[in-house]
Image: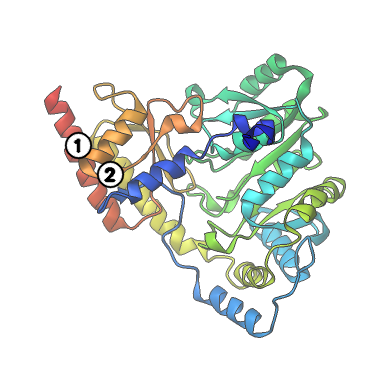
């Protein structure tokens, strides 16, 4: 008897993460230089670790309130107001097990089977997988020809083609895999298309502290469409706390109350001591990301120049820690083959762009959340590989 045939039929539409699979392959090759995962190479700041130790010693090892500790929710509220002019009372905030759980909770709370979700691509594959699990249908919008940004015209066209079953728009800015972000004016224009339509917007703003061009003006659709927007954020990227698993989501009171139902019956609550650590991160270290951001920007500029020397064209990454590079026309345009051969021949691991959906084919994603020494070594090896390929041609 094959019991897998009796499982949730939507799982047939979900595959294991190709990004993690490729990263595992790279890990199996000794000495490989990895530009694969969005994992900050910085350690969590010391004051946050000490806050966690103090929490454990104070026996904060019992259940926290399901939606989050009062101290952390207050810290989130103040952080968002001070940093981004986003105003959410603590009762409009739910603390989650990372932004990942916030995404799952949002999608499963909003969708009914058969509902459609507009997703600008290329993008993080988890969004599509979560929609599939919830029984929804992804409507991908290829943004490659528009500098990897969703425009009002592209959005309007997608709405017309998808019909009245569209329930959700997913936006990620600064974005993975491109590092591209929006201006507030661009988000306002998208809001004008969505206003008064029965459509939610899930804004994944996990990279909000890693905006380069004008870091004091992180934009948000929540400014222009607050009643329809669910904002997702967390401390994983801003405070190098990926393993602590603390994220949060914010919405108007009626929506947050409904989101709390899936959250409560999925995880009960995030760990108490990690919430205490996150509270210290936001209250005592609101600018902890600044030195990390400065180093990321230096790495970004170095990689872009190195890739330009090899004739790769890159989308301008205004945030996050990714470069999305177009493979030169005289090299193998199959990004999956290119990446696997580069790893085999020269031990450099990049993620094929096609893993991120329509618009990604022929591109490569490089994460520069690794040391400059590794980046310099990896770029040297990549130069050698490209030159060898050109000599063979």
Badge 1 is on which residue?
385
Q: Is residue 307 above or below residue 77?
A: above
Which of the two residues, 269 or 84, is positioned nearer the viewer here? 269
Residue 139: x percent and y percent?
64, 24
Q: Residues within 10 Å of mark 2 (few under 14, many from 20)?
A: many
> Residue placed at 38% from the left, 30% from the top?
363
Q: Could you say whether the residue bearing mark 1 is in a helix, strand or loop?
A: helix
Whether label 1 touches label 2, CB < 8 Å = yes
Badge 2 is on which residue?
348
Instruction: State the colouring used for the structure image.
Output: rainbow
Q: How many marks?
A: 2
> Residue placed at 77% from the left, 22% from the top?
165
- The image's mark for residue 144 is none
Q: Is residue 58 shown to the viewer in this render? A: yes
Residue 264: x percent and y percent?
79, 55
Looking at the image, the residue that sits furthest to the right is 254
Does residue 372 appear to the left or right of 224 in the view shown? left
Q: Could you say whether the residue bearing mark 2 is in a helix, strand or loop?
A: strand
**Residue 133's image quarter?**
top right
């Amino acid at each position: 008897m094959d019991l897998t045939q009796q499982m949730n039929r939507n799982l047939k539409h979900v595959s294991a993460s190709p990004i993690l699979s490729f990263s595992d392959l790279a890990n199996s090759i000794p000495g490989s230089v990895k530009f694969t995962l969005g994992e900050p190479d910085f350690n969590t700041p010391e004051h946050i670790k000490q806050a966690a130790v103090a929490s454990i010693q104070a026996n904060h090892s019992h259940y926290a309130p399901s939606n989050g500790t009062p101290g952390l929710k207050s810290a989130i509220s103040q952080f968002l107001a001070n940093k981004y002019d986003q105003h959410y009372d603590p009762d409009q905030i739910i603390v989650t097990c990372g932004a990942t759980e916030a995404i799952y909770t949002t999608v499963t709370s909003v969708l009914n089977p058969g509902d459609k979700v507009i997703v600008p691509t290329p993008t993080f594959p988890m969004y599509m997988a979560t929609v599939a699990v919830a029984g929804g249908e992804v409507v991908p919008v290829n943004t490659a020809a528009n500098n990897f940004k969703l425009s009002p015209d592209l959005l309007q066209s997608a709405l017309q083609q998808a019909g009245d079953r569209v329930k959700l728009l997913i936006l990620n800015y600064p974005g993975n895999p491109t590092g591209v972000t929006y201006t507030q004016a661009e988000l306002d224009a998208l809001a004008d298309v969505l206003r008064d339509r029965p459509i939610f917007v899930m804004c994944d703003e996990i990279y909000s502290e890693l905006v380069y061009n004008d870091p004091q003006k992180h934009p948000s659709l929540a400014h222009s469409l607050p009643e329809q927007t669910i904002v997702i954020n967390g401390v994983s990227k801003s405070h190098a706390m990926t393993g602590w698993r603390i994220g949060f989501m914010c919405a108007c009171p009626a929506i947050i109350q409904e989101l709390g139902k899936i959250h409560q019956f999925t995880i009960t609550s995030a760990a108490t001591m990690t919430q205490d650590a996150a509270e210290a991160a936001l209250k005592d270290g609101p600018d902890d990301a600044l030195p990390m951001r400065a180093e990321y920007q230096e790495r970004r500029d170095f990689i872009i120049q190195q890739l330009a020397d090899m004739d790769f064209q890159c989308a301008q990454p205004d945030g996050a820690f990714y470069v999305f590079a177009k493979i030169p026309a005289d090299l193998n345009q199959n990004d999956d083959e290119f990446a696997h051969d580069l790893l085999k021949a020269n031990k450099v691991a990049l993620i094929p762009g096609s893993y991120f959906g329509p618009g990604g084919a022929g591109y490569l994603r490089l994460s520069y959340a690794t040391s400059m020494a590794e980046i310099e070594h990896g770029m040297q090896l990549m130069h050698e590989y490209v030159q060898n390929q050109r000599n063979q041609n």
